[in-house]
Image (cartoon, rainbow, N blue to C red):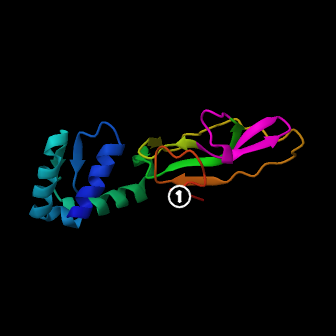
């Protein structure tokens, strides 16, 4: 129960505006779990709800999704996502160790250019567009490395929370 409570507490902290915790799946039938959730989350103004047939709600949802994938219109992102990028070096914001010189002036390397933050609602089918420029005016191609992070505030792709 401690791990479940801790995980839900982290979700409530990261995803703003949660007013209800819906408990589903086989363990939702446990009166111990429901009492623990109600006790742990009564102070954060979250109602704990267990729907009828909570133990099979996940299976019903999977079946509905299999029949019509459009029933899921948005998801909450488990990770922050971004690409490794370069930007103009800012001595007030970037560590000196991330500075490199290019034809266009000093650049900061290994920037985690985030386009989705952990806990954001991501609408299915929504396109995210970003303009990028080349590192050097002599460059003829670019390779994008996509990263994910377990934190909302990651700045650099070599942060321990980042992987690709």
Residue 81 percent across, percent down from the top left: 54, 49
Residue at left 23%, top 39%?
19
Q: Mark 1 points at which residue?
A: 160
From what the image shows, is residue 105 above or below residue 74? above
From what the image shows, is residue 42 above or below residue 4? above
Residue at left 52%, top 43%?
116
- Quadrant containing the N terminus is bottom left
| Residue 112, visible in the rendered structure | yes
Residue 138 percent across, percent down from the top left: 90, 42
Residue at left 56%, top 41%?
115
Instruction: Check residue 80 for magenta coloring.
Output: no
| Residue 135, visible in the rendered structure | no
Q: In which quarter of the image is residue 107?
A: top right
Residue 42 percent across, percent down from the top left: 13, 44
Residue at left 17%, top 48%?
48
From what the image shows, is residue 82 above or below residue 88? below
Q: Quadrant of residue 139?
A: top right
Q: What's the magenta region?
A: 90-113
């Amino acid at each position: 129960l401690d791990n479940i409570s801790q995980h839900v507490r982290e979700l409530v902290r990261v995803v703003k505006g949660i007013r209800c915790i819906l408990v589903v799946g086989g363990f939702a039938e446990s009166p111990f779990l429901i009492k623990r959730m109600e006790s742990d989350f009564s102070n954060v103004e979250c109602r704990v709800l267990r729907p009828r047939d909570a133990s099979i709600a996940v299976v019903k949802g999977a079946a509905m999704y299999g029949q019509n994938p459009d029933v899921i219109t948005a998801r909450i992102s488990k990770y922050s996502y971004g690409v490794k990028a370069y930007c103009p070096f800012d001595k007030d914001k970037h560590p000196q160790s991330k500075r490199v010189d290019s034809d266009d002036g000093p650049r900061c390397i290994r920037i985690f250019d985030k386009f989705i933050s952990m806990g954001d609602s991501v609408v299915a089918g929504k396109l995210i567009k970003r303009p990028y420029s080349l590192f050097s005016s002599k460059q003829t191609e670019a390779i994008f490395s996509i990263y994910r992070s377990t934190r909302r505030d990651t700045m650099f792709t070599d942060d321990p929370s980042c992987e690709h």
